[in-house]
Image (cartoon, rainbow, N blue to C red):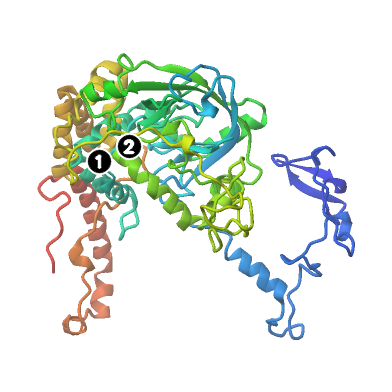
Amino acid sequence: SFRWLPEATFCSTASYSLHPVALLQTTPPESQAMAPQQHSTGAGAGGCPMMTSTAGAPWPNNQDTKTAGSRGPVLLEDYQLIEKLAHQNRERIPERTVHAKGWGAFGRLKITGDISKFTCAKCLQKGKETPLLARFSTVAGEAGGADLERDLRGFSLKMYTEEGNWDMVGNNTPVFFVRDPSKFPDFIHALKRHPVTHQRSPTALWDFWSLSPEAMHQITILMSDRGLPASLVNMNGYGSHTYSLWNDKGERFWVKFHFKTQQGIKNLTNAEAEQITGRSRDTCGEDLYNRIERGDCPKWSFQIQVMTMAQAEECPFDPFDLTKVWPHKDYPMIEVGEIKLTRNPESYFSDVEQAAFSPNNIVPGIGYSPDRMLQARLFAYADTHRYRLGTHYEQLPVNKPRCPVFHYHRDGPMNVEGGLQSGNPNAYYEPNSFGGAAEKRSAEEPPVPVSGDAKRHDHRESYDDFEQVRELYSKTLSPEERGRLHNNLAGSLVGVPKEIVERAFALLHRIHPDYESGCRKELEGLLSAGEYAPNGMPVTLETPHTVNPAKLQKPTIAEAAAEPSTSTSSTSSGSSGSHQQKASSKKKGVLAWCGHNSATAGAPEPSR
């Protein structure tokens, strides 16, 4: 809807301006308005701030390009045109490989519980409030993807503490698909688009999953109700990894971070999500923005689980395994505080797209753990920011710490602000005698005992990948929830070759026989119907999962010359029958792909 607003609302030379109601409809109060910086030669037309080049010179004409004559070619000296085109060409940066589509908001972390016996971190002491930035995201989809796909959601926080930035980089689930970082790139490749068809491939995904039994815990959560949150504020957040806390005595404790929504858990079915996506692909971001704008600020309760070093030694499973949870009955939740989001970004690009979260950003009192995935992320996240945003990413306003920064880094692209930040221009090396920044030995973490041989240890050796999933399936989920789990998981298997399906079913059987039989029954029903059913993923019955490698082999010049040519007359005379044959073949191919012809489903065609 639109309404007419007077000229005074906008710097417009027209009497009135057509303006969407959804946008800001009034000028901000004088107390909030930013006074325009006037150029020495005066203001622009209509009382607006004067438009300038990026070098500050007045911009005389933003309507017409400089040409040689009214019909002549454009002159290279029209630097205003060159400047505009150059900036337009660089208005985008590489999107994140994963977590590409995201939403953010600012708020604060308030500590209400006393956990000083576990940590000396100043930001975690009772009564402390710390400003923060939160970013939520989908994982598999691109920046323009739909909000409501069956997918994990990223849940990341950047706390601007007095001791530096603390980044908590997590998801909306407490576990993950893999436990060894060597498999992370392979998993993401399977999750993303096929290199030839450029379509998402359930076959690739289930091929990887069925060969990775450690993924079954995360798969079960993903295919359950919680795999499709109704909104960003109706889901929990988890640090997922095991981190550590340490206190003034030098004692270390292993810890899990939890953020429980105070808005309640709400999820959607595949059909509900598909219907909403048909109207809008951006409902989650819209909901978060509007909530904060109307003052309905979302909150999450901050809780932790703690494990002592001695308990970790006696734990029946690896407490640093990212595919495992810590049972609440053994490691109860401890209330710490809450986070509250109160302000929307002023610039999406500056505040959200340029935000860089790195688990290596910790503060004294908080530490890492031997979690293999966490250890790899300590390098990978900072490295991807250097690629995506530039080596100066920590000097961008949204990533800059709110505390004083002193170091001996010199010049170059990683120091775009220039100058030395040691505290004294004569102290450009360390140690020095000129009062330059000095180390703080009290910030050193207590030691972590290690033992064993340095080698490539088999991450699947002596691991039980089914016990915790069995507990989740048989004791945590209700019969109704298990029924929806069966349907969701079966829907993702439609079109996957029978060999891979059976391999997946074998893993489900090891978890619980009812898990396998329930999913098998649902899949048989979907295949017998032979019709598309909502599956929570951007695929249909027509989506190609794989390609025939033989068809991609380019013939040599000699082979191409030797192929017999087809006459125009024969092609045109058989056109009608050819179309019918193609349509029949296409329909038959879909049924075979869905498992009706299990002998050939997914098998490559013989090379010609």
**Label 1, residues with CA under 10 Å away: few <14, some 14-19, many ≥20:** many
Helix, strand or loop at mark 1: loop
Q: Is residue 86 left or right of residue 121?
A: right
| Residue 89 in the image: above or below residue 292 | below
- Residue shown at 36%/41% (left/top)? 537
- Quarter in which the N terminus is drawn: top right
Which residue position holds label 2?
533
Q: Amino acid at mark 2?
A: Ala
| Residue 553 in the image: above or below residue 524 | below
Residue 326 appears anywhere in the view: yes
In the image, farthest residue toward the front: 433
Which residue position holds label 1?
494
- Quarter in which the C terminus is drawn: bottom left
| Residue 84 in the image: above or below residue 528 | below
Q: Quadrant of residue 304?
A: top left
Q: Which mark is residue 91?
A: none
